[in-house]
Amino acid sequence: MPPGKRRKTEETADLRLQSQLCEEERFWDLMRRMARENRTAVLSFILIVLVVLASLLAPVLTPYDENGMDLMHRLSPPSQDHLLGTDEGGRDELTRLLYGARVSLLIGVVPALLSLILGSALGVIAGYRGGLADAVIMRAADVTLAFPSMLLAMVIMYSLGGGIVNVFLTLTLVNWANVARVVRSRTLALKSSEFVEAARVIGVPEGRIMRRHILPNCLPTLLVLFTLNIPASILTESSLSFLGLGIQPPNASWGLMINTGRQYLYSAPWLCFAPGAAIMLIVLAFNFLGNGLLDVLDPRQRKQ
Amino acid sequence: MKRILALLLTVALLPCFPAFADSAEPGLLRTAVLYDISTMDVTETTDDYLIPMNVFDRLFETRPAGGSSEIVKSLVTDYSVSEDGLTYDFTLRGGVVFSNGSALTASDVQYSFERLLKAARENTEIPLEIVGGEAVMNGEADVLEGFRVTDDTHFSVTLASPNAGFLAELSAPAMSIVDAETMADVKAFGKEPADTVGTGPYRVTEWVSNDHYTLVYNEKYWGAEPSVKKLIVKTIPDAMSQNLMFQNGELDIIDLQSQDSAVVASTYKADPSARIVSTPNVGMIYLIMNENTPWLRDVRVRKAIGMAIDRDQIIQGVFMGDAVKENGVIPNGVWGHNDALEGFAFDPDGARALLREAGCKDGEIRFELSMDSTANTSTQLIYAFISDSLRRIGIEATVVSYDHSSWLAKRSSGEMDSFVARWGMDYNDPANIMYTFFGSAESTKARSINYSDADVIARVAAARAIADDAARMSEYQALEKKLIADDAAWIPFCVGLHLWCLGDRVESFTPQWAGFADFYAADVVLR
Amino acid sequence: MRRSIAQRFLQALIVLVGVVLLTFVMLRVVPGNPIETMMGEHADAATVARMTAELGLDQPMHRQFLRYLSSALRGDFGTSYSLGKPVSLLLKSAFRNTLYLALFAALFAWILGVACGLVCAVSKNRLPDRLFLGFSLLGISLPVFMAAMFLQYVLAFKLKWFPISGTDSWRGFVLPAAALGWNSAGQVAQMTRTSLLETLQEDYIETARAKGLGRFGVLVRHALRNAMLPVLTLMAIQFSGLLSGAVITETVFSINGVGRLMVQAISGRDIPLLQGTSLLATSVVILGSLLADCLYSVLDPRIRKEG
């Protein structure tokens, strides 16, 4: 086949594909529908945006230094100067909460994104190639899933040591298997679909089929997975930090703040309640948003 | 509809649910610790002393006496010291038997000393002072040359060089006496309760790792019968739970060292009915810096660090006033403590000037404050406070937390930049702290991370042999001045008071004199 | 059907070996000699060398792995560095507590979840439904440690109904189990609601109703029974989640369980203990999902026919 002609057929295949894809316009249509029908999801989205803004604007919003200690004013109750009181080192709790939001949100988003990339790459390979690649990848996923997620995270944190980058890696390694499973089953379904058959018949290389034809079709599912993985990561990190195995001081994440605040539950309950409420709200918001997306993007899976 | 009614009725009746009442049998004392012990054997630990103290006896005991302490005879009824201060003759208490019925003899004492050396792990320092100790530890000799058994109740010990603090050292938990005959039969001494047999007032009946262990009164004990007949020590790693358990009557005595002083102040001290018992926590909280690290080897930088930290804030803020300022090496409550010393005065401007004099710019000095992750809240706060204080004079000191064993390994490698720790005195003699930290090139590597003045090290080692107590103390005090005022070898902070709170079932409690946290259950009187 | 179960069994075995391999490799890529770490400040070269040889740590990795595998099969997981006792002994006393905790929690989640789901389904889209649905979402989003701390503070400390800590009697398990089951209860409730609503639309329900059975009778006798299948599978999956949460509840309530043993192993850099605990936990999960699969194929007539 002369190169010019090959190029041409491939383009036709791409054209045919596009008609089946969830196009950009249709995507925004769906989003508008969600905004109209699902008020909780909209409210959740607004809340998330507000938290992100507040954490970014922390230096403007608060006059205090995140790590500035004042041993003479430890555990002081909420007052006009300190809206949420001070912690065990005399640091302003609200300030810590705002800076902690940066860490906690980052820990939600980065591993969710990384596990999405890793999981979908492996999932699409397993689904499309089949055979040995499929067996190896899926057994690896089974092994990962056989671990209760918290225990796996603990074992990995042990090998890597504490700190934020290692928390990213750990949560990625914990979450990839689920993504890979979902993407694999989508790939299996798509593989036998007409347009992929067509692309294969006209000789489009494997890698290109996976990248251009299969993955884009998984995008709605992936978006939902991404949104739901964020609160899961935040919860796992907060549990790890609660055990003292996650973020290391003086960095503050919400989970770590609860860990240190816990021994003052009796004398300074606000040290637990403030970050606890923050975790709950943000997790709830992401869950609502994720479920809202699931409803409009992938109603079939929602029913299952 | 009937079902709904039943449901409503259940909900309405819930508040009448009988309150949980933990019934404690008479003679039972319940307490909690944050970490489980790893062994009951003193050849393997310098931390877990609660069982050795209560299950074994020593030749002498250190007992509290008006703020300080005295050495009293325990398994020994009589002793004499030779004129050169080298040989000690002892008479053993007659009729003492171990909890399994085996009789105590002089050869058991010899066996106990030799065992520490043959195990060659922890607590070898004291028996090493005896003639031939080194040879037994190296495996070159089987028998301790300086230990002579005359008959079942008489023996003598010869030291390689005179040590005026030797009797005090014999009262350390490390010098617990075990039974030679029993040890030949049992497999798991120190691990298995039934195998761990002593002459003390209690015997161990149960040890469930990570959960609890139980001591009961040893009916064959030679001394007076204690008021506490049974002691249950629960492992409760969570300070808050200990606090709640004590307040709910699930514990009879709480060691308030597990709690932040701020909690003690707001929860316990604020309650007029709380019965708090306190004793000086004989020891020292200090910051030590590695003299092999760039910048920290400059004495001006070390002094500047000392001047940048406001110790009054630590005492008033971290310990809420429940602490005594320390200015030297020999702590309050120890023989030879010097009241006249003045430590580093808080002076951040002076500190900055010193740093400029040493030729360093803002932010140029960076080092690591290595923290043991098992450090309690007060110590963690002190770390954070030091880091914050040094930032204010332009030094970047980052707190890095290591798990306990990694921290120990890093420290003994001599490569740690700096750390904060608390040294608790094992017995009442300044050698316990001076010699351990500054007495030999080997121990300075880990303890005072590479303190470098060889002359001072030699003088500290020699001071132990000065027979005249007054002369020995004045030599120690001179060395102390040199170490702190001239060399800034460490920055002494303070030492906290050790507080306990007594529950309703406890009548009284006399805490023992020591720097370690454990107590004698026989010192508790129940109602 | 027998063949598919055998296949499933083989698969589980492969996964188990994979788990051993994974933990084995992961724990050995940690820098530093574990013996030196374990001995702390008293590590002299001779002792380290002797103990390294004793534990076989100087042999090639594959040899070490086979050695570990074979002694693990005989129930020997080595001796814990930090607690100084055989790992198998420590696991035995800890596993009992964790098992009770997880079973109680599962029971709690199942009863509460099914009850809530039932109420929701019956009053679909009315106030009770909305209320319970919100409640179950709260359950899903509430971190386990918050639930545990809250229950401990209110029910044990303030009201004194239960002990703060302790496993001496069943009372000590109530609060930890409730805290642990809270999350799953929310998910069970949602699942029960969805599958009940679906079943209620099926033909045979109409028939039953036409035959004159009361609303409640139809619900319990027909709909609930058939709706339980997906809920049962969910519970099997949840068991793994319960073990994750157990780490937290055991820490808050100071229960000597597998999870807390694992925390202890990590803070003491105790490789044999960490290996033993993770192996035990994963075996339980693998066994659980295997059982769930078998149960499902026995209970679901459609699958039975296919097999």
Image: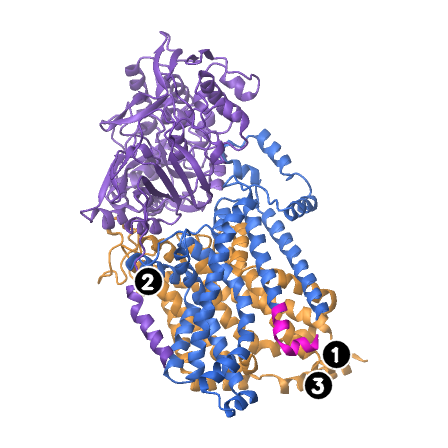
Q: Nearer the viewer, residue A302 or B292?
A: A302
| Amino acid bearing label 2 | Phe
- Taking the magenta stretch, the answer to whether it contains residue C160 is no
The chief SS type of the magenta part is helix
Q: In the rendered structure, the residue with mark 3 lies on which chain?
A: A
Left or right side of B58 for B191: right
Name the mark on residue C177: none
Q: Residue at left 65%, top 39%?
A: C56
Q: Secondary structure at mark 2?
A: helix
Question: Which stretch appears magenta?
Answer: C294-307
Q: CA distance from mark 1 to mark 2?
A: 57 Å
Q: Colour of chain C?
A: blue
Query: Are discs 3 and 2 located on one and the same chain?
Result: yes
Quick check: marks 1 and 3 in contact, CB under 8 Å?
no
- Taking the magenta stretch, the answer to whether it contains residue C298 is yes
Q: Secondary structure at mark 3?
A: helix
Task: Look at mark 1 in the image and give the residue it sits on.
Answer: A200
Q: Colour of chain A?
A: orange
Q: Is residue B285 visible?
A: yes
- Examine the image and state in which quarter residue C285 appears: bottom right
Task: Look at mark 3 in the image and give the residue it sits on.
Answer: A12
Image depth: mark 1 or mark 2 in front: 2
Q: Position of residue A142 (x, y in %)?
A: 63, 63
Q: Nearer the viewer, residue B64 or A102?
A: B64
Q: Residue at left 63%, top 87%?
A: A19
- Examine the image and state in which quarter residue C232 appears: bottom right
Q: Residue at left 57%, top 82%?
A: A300
Q: Which chain is purple?
A: B
| Amino acid bearing label 3 | Thr
